[in-house]
Image (tube, grey):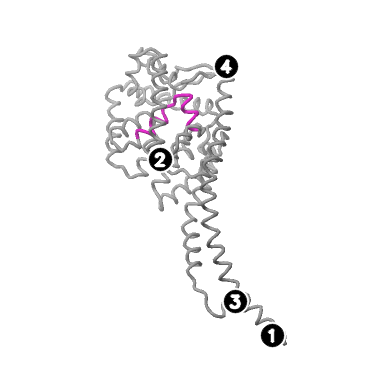
Amino acid sequence: MTEGGGSDGEQADGRAAAPSLAGLAGRLNPALLAAIRAGWPPILCAWFAWQTYQRISFFVDHNFPAGIDATIYYRGVVAWLHGANPWDAAVTVGGSAYHYAGSPVTTVILAPAALLNEDVFTAAWLGLTWLAAAWTLRRLKLPLWWLLFPPISEALFSANPQLIVLALILAERSWLAAIGTALKVYAFIPLAGEGRWRAILVSVGVNAATILVAPGLWLAYIKQFGDISNRLEFESIQGFSAFYFPELLAVTVVALAILALRDRAAAGWLAVPAAWPASQLHYSTMALPVMTPLLAFFLAVPVLRLPPEIILVEIVRRLVAPYVSAFLAARRTIPDRPGAGA
């Protein structure tokens, strides 16, 4: 036998083995994907539970009252109705004051809260927050154990309006979306991402109407805006987003803009936790409509500046994945042909 003959035999063996290996890979891939899909829910549930336990334990150990954010909003609204400065209203915990920072629109729209006393309003708002969370999970077809997702559980503890705002947006009624933008102005961003222009038009009208209702409140807000923003930055420890970090913010904004060219809706839902100033952990609930298991895994961790970093990874994945899928699909459809081994 010649050396060349041995080489030809190896090539022939390679050609014979290649289809078998490809077939094995084809059988393994669906099985692997099925195993991953089956394994993610219990892993996420346990991860959420552990992170939530640590987060809520911190609040309880440091004497943060349940419904603290609802109480802050109530005190701000009542202060305004009694002729005081609403942005001086606060709740003090452990010697630290957490001040009201709502816009004039929020202050006006919550004015009926003054018909109740503080404890009743806080309890009622807590109940409404839980209902909004349950409805949102049902709307997004997520299991009930997602209530353990730390951004959700934190909002449930503090009664922050975020979960109610998310439910109002997802309800797909223009007038409900308008209430959402009145409670949190950043609600305009996912509305724009979804292309809900009628809802945006109605929301602009509702927001603008408060200028006629309370012009003095607006003037006071504009005058104090710098002080309110600086105090909010301090009390939020600069928040979880990239807003106060120019280099990270620039990269994040550019990445969101590129994503918007391909998927404007996803960019709209991800923009708030990634880039809104003084964001808190519960702001990450705004990403629920486009959530993936890996994104949820990291957004569950209460680490400052982690949301924009993991959202950048998610943006890259969304931009690259279609090309990778197309490449793999093309590779699978290339037929075996004689001489392929050579």
Give whichever of 171, 175 is nearer the camera. 171
Magenta region includes residue 299: no
Looking at this view, is 219 or 34 the one in front?
Answer: 34
Q: Residues within 10 Å of mark 2 (few under 14, many from 20)?
A: few
Above or below, 314 against 136 in this view is below
**Magenta-drawn stretch contains 152:** yes
Q: Secondary structure at mark 3?
A: loop
Q: Residue at x 32, y 36 (%)?
A: 171
Q: Do the residues under discs 2 and 4 have CB atoms within 8 angstroms?
A: no
- Please provide percent x and percent y for residue 58: 58, 24
* Kind of residue at disc 1: Gly
Q: In the displayed orientation, state which residue is furthest to the bottom.
A: 1
The amino acid type found where label 3 is placed reads Gly
Residue corresponding to mark 1: 4
- The three-letter code of the residue at mark 2 reads Lys
- Choose the circle earlier in sequence order: 1 or 2: 1
Q: Which mark is residue 308?
A: none
What label sits on residue 141 in the rendered view? 2
Q: Secondary structure at mark 4?
A: loop
Look at mark 4 in the image and give the residue it sits on: 94
Determine the secondary structure under disc 1. Answer: helix
Please give the label number shown on residue 341.
3
